[in-house]
Image (cartoon, helix red, strand yellow):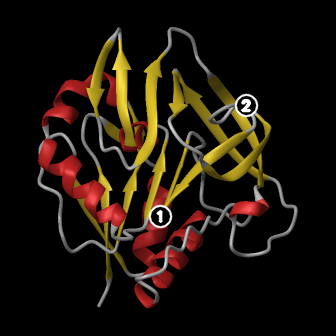
Amino acid sequence: SSLKVGIARDEAFHFYYEDDLQQLQSRGVELIEISPLRDAFPTDLDGLLIGGGFPERHAAELSKNQAFRRDLAAAIANGLPVRAECGGLMYLCQSIAVEDVVWPMVGAIDGAVTMQTSPQGRGYMKLGYNNANTRTKRSAATLAAHEFHHSTIQFESDVKFAYSVKRGHGVDGKHDGVCVQNVVASYAHFRHGVATPWVDWFLNTIAEAKTEPQKRVGHV
């Protein structure tokens, strides 16, 4: 049977490369569109994508859908593989502060997001693997990505990062790709390709989570 991967798609989350989604579908993945603004969280997903967008513009509505937030947090705690980028990263944190109003979010990542008036990271990125936090030995390859975000994150506890930042800003100027359970959540936007085969990384995480459900994979 095909893998079922949820894709957050509504006014708050909508930044995806169609080529990348087609790449997933060509591997036999069934993409199931869900709205964190309006929907219930599906219970039968093998993985989840939460792309970029503008959660800060829809923070009240995202916060109001408590059942979705609660069920997503429970699924993550239970090992659901998730790839989140930018807006997705923000949504997975404890809260988003917009003009001094703090809106509760999913809480899977122990950090608080604050919107800033100026861009905190903008443009082309070069990333390396933060080898201490990746399970597989990789070459010293440089990963290309891009970022555009106006938010910062204050973490409440120690964080594991997937990537070191060689160019760009990422989370804190030095790191990007927060790893929690089987989640990798980054400010970096990746395009699937030979140098950054994120579809392969994601499918590997799903495969390992299925064979070792009791073990947290934490794959990049």
Relative to residue 82, is residue 12 drawn left or right? left
Viewer-side label of 1, 2: 1
Q: Which mark is residue 181?
A: 1
Relative to residue 172, is residue 149 drawn left or right? left
Asked whether the viewer can see residue 59, the reply is: yes
Asked whether the viewer can see residue 35, the reply is: no
Up/down of 113 relative to 73, above or below: above
| Amino acid on which the number 1 mark rests in the picture | Gln
Up/down of 127 relative to 155, above or below: below
Residue under label 2: 173
**For the point 11% across and 54% down, which residue is it?**
40
Closer to the camera, 21 or 135? 135
Give the quarter of the figure containing the C terminus: bottom right
Residue 32 figure quarter: bottom left
Q: Position of residue 140 (x, y in %)?
A: 88, 62
Give the class, few, some or many, for how many residues have Cα within 10 Å of label 1's Cα (few <14, many ≥20). some
| Amino acid on which the number 2 mark rests in the picture | Gly
Give the quarter of the figure containing the N terminus: bottom left
